[in-house]
Image (cartoon, grey):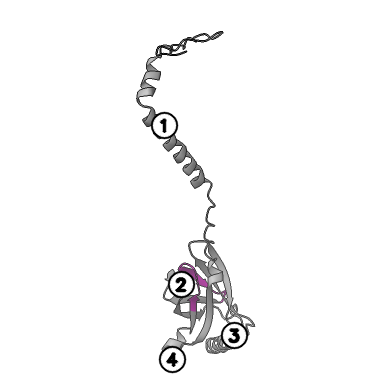
């Protein structure tokens, strides 16, 4: 073979017919025109759904522990008798206690009483009053003898019943104020009832 001309098929070779593309519908034509936008949108959807899944399945932080019950956060301590004029002493036995809130939210004293039928109680400040966390409040408690027959003669472990409230709960709690309080209360009751019997 020499010369220049078109290439002709050799023996046992045939020219293949190249299949013609089928006619495409309007959706396929639109896809061809916007292929990049469609692929970018699909990729963005995959990334967003994967990110959403990771966000919802992330470890959740532990919830904060609940605040303490009010009786667990409060101390009530006997301080001393209130000394004053004879007219003040005649009005009843007054003493101070110190209420301290160690931790947690503020605590409100809604009621302060004592267990004996022959005595009545008033406080200054009058209940209800609130004490903030990490602070203390002096309370003046005045006991008056209403009936000597029902008043205790020698109380061993006298206590005060205090109703406390914070954001977690309302609790009635009894506070034993100790031996000094028991001695001072016994002396005050003895004086009050011996004056009453005269």
Q: Residues within 10 Å of mark 1 (few under 14, many from 20)?
A: few
**Vertical position of residue 15 compared to residue 59: above or below:** above
- On residue 86, the disc is 4
* CA gap, disc 4 and disc 1: 96 Å
* CA gap, disc 2 and disc 4: 37 Å
Query: Which label's residue is closer to the chain start, 4 or 3?
Result: 4
- On residue 133, the disc is 2
Front residue (pair 146, 159): 159
Query: Which label's residue is closer to the chain start, 1 or 3?
Result: 1
Q: Residue at x 51, y 85 (%)?
A: 79
**Vertical position of residue 18 compared to residue 82: above or below:** above
* CA gap, disc 1 and disc 2: 60 Å
* CA gap, disc 1 and disc 3: 86 Å
Image location of residue 10, percent across then percent down? 52, 10
Based on the picture, tell me whether residue 117 belongs to the magenta stretch.
yes
Q: Quadrant of residue 191?
A: bottom right
- On residue 39, the disc is 1
Q: Return the residue at label 3.
A: 182
**Vertical position of residue 45 compared to residue 111: above or below:** above
Query: Which label's residue is closer to the chain start, 2 or 3?
Result: 2
Q: As drawn, is 40 to the left or to the right of 10?
A: left
Query: Which label's residue is closer to the chain start, 4 or 1?
Result: 1
- On residue 83, the disc is none
Which image quarter is the C terminus in? bottom right
């Amino acid at each position: 073979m020499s010369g220049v001309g078109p290439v002709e098929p050799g023996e046992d070779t045939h020219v293949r017919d190249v299949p013609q593309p089928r006619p495409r519908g309007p959706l396929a034509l639109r896809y061809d025109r916007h292929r990049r936008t469609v692929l970018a949108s699909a990729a963005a959807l995959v990334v967003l759904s994967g990110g959403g899944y990771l966000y919802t399945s992330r470890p959740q932080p532990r919830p904060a522990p609940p605040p303490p019950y009010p009786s667990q956060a409060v101390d009530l301590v006997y301080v001393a008798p209130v000394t004053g004029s004879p007219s003040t002493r005649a009005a009843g036995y007054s003493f101070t206690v110190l209420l301290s809130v160690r931790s947690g939210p503020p605590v409100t004293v809604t009621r302060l009483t004592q267990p004996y039928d022959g005595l009545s109680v008033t406080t200054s400040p009058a209940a209800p009053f609130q004490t903030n966390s990490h602070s203390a409040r002096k309370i003046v408690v005045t006991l008056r003898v209403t009936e000597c027959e029902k008043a205790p003669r020698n109380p061993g472990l006298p206590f005060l019943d205090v109703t406390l409230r914070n954001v977690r709960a309302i609790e009635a709690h009894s506070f034993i104020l100790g031996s000094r309080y028991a001695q001072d209360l016994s002396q005050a009751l003895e004086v009050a009832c011996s004056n009453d019997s005269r």
